[in-house]
Amino acid sequence: MTQVLFDYTRQDATGSSCTAQAWARVPPAQSPAERQRTRERAAGLLKSQRAVLVAHYYVDGDIQDLALASGGIVADSLEMARFGRDHPAQTLVVAGVRFMGESAKILSPHKRVLMPDLDATCSLDLGCPPEPFAAFCDANPDRQVVVYANTSAAVKARADWMVTSSCALAIVSHLKDQGHKVLWAPDRHLGRYIQEQTGADMLLWNGACIVHDEFKGLELELMRQQHPGALVLVHPESPQSVVAQADVVGSTTQLLNAVVKGSAPAYIVATDNGLMHRMRQLAPGKVLLEAPTAGRSATCKSCAHCPWMAMNATSGVVNCLERGSGEVHVPEPVRTQALGCITRMLDFVARNPASVQLPARGPLPHVGAA
Ligand code: SF4
């Protein structure tokens, strides 16, 4: 394993921000034969332990294929949470980053929730520590506290609502219609986008995703000139100069569906390039171009792929099932507190199904023993 360092933005209770540093580790590459053996071993363990694999769109393609072929799911964080809660399996293997495992445990306390690497985190989670966040909330008691899914269980325990990028617009619109002001955390770009779209009174925490924050507006303009027929798909965690050029702004699922259902032959995609794997499977023949992340003189930090999502390897699925390692625990008082804001979101989505889009379905790849 090699370790790499990344800078991220961290805010304190007064609203001041600083740059902090975090690490991620890169799993060693496997030969094609090793990969196949590992996939088959993981599939056999999932079956023998009656476990289900719940994977995010940004993780390695081998894990995505394994999840689909073994009866699991590849989805965004909203659908991952719902699927894990509703699936009868007593062991959930969550391939993603830590807050996704915590959300699964909060919703299913009696299930065993395992992760391939418990140290896989998120710059949004890191950039919003629970204590300064609670102090920030205490200083603004007249606002409904709305947090993005990409936060720790302790931060969710302080929130009134959790949202994902699939349903954030609908929920903040609802709050505005009810006359509420909003304290939003942690992603500043997504918060600004929702503020612009809804006109809601929103106080924003200063956090950012190190992947989406890197997309560059000027370079995107040049790319659009080179590919005039291509549609531009943008995740709203991206900077304003990038969102402003989008033909479609949406969650991972909404961007995937835009490619699958779209009639354009080519798409410029501004989100983690892990999503390209599912896009290629469901929309073969369409041209997919990664949105630019850096200019000539800039240094690319994440290069459009989340270093923490990349910590998920199929060998990690094997390890956690064989050894029971990577089990997620959430202290019960925190869990019950955090459950409130997640349940409120899930109930809202159940009452307003048109406010979100489900993952696109498609042929399952073959991965051996599953
Ligand atoms: S892609 Fe960004 S928002 Fe998603 S887990 Fe990685 S750092 Fe967090």
Image (spheres, rainbow, N blue to C red):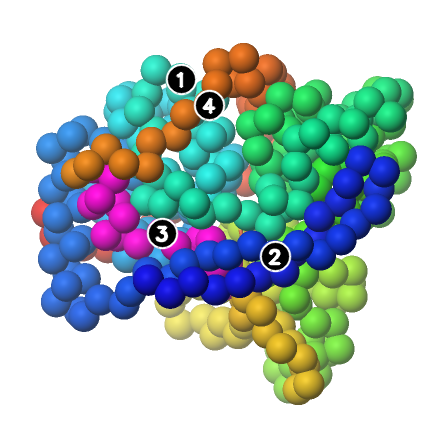
What secondary structure do most residues of the magenta stretch adopt?
Answer: helix
Q: Secondary structure at mark 2?
A: strand
- Quadrant in the rendering for residue 137: top right
> What residue sits 40% from the left and 17% below the top?
109
> What residue sits 38% from the left and 65% below the top?
2
- Circle 2 or circle 1, nearest the eye: 2
- Quadrant in the rendering for residue 19: bottom right
Crowd band around label 2 with a 10 angstrom C-alpha radius: few (<14), some (14–19), many (20+): few
| Sequence-first tag of 2 and 1 | 2
Three-letter code for the amino acid on which mark 1 is drawn: Pro
| Sequence-first tag of 4 and 1 | 1
| Sequence-first tag of 4 and 3 | 3
- Circle 2 or circle 3, nearest the eye: 2
How far is mark 3 from mark 1, CA to CA?
A: 23 Å
Three-letter code for the amino acid on which mark 3 is drawn: Asn
| Sequence-first tag of 2 and 4 | 2
| Sequence-first tag of 3 and 1 | 1
Residue tagged by mark 3? 312
Magenta-tinted stretch: 305-321
Q: Is residue 67 left or right of residue 237?
A: left
Visible residue check, residue 267: no
The label number, if any, that marks residue 21 in the structure image: 2
Q: Is residue 290 magenta?
A: no
Callout 2 touching callout 1 (CB < 8 Å): no
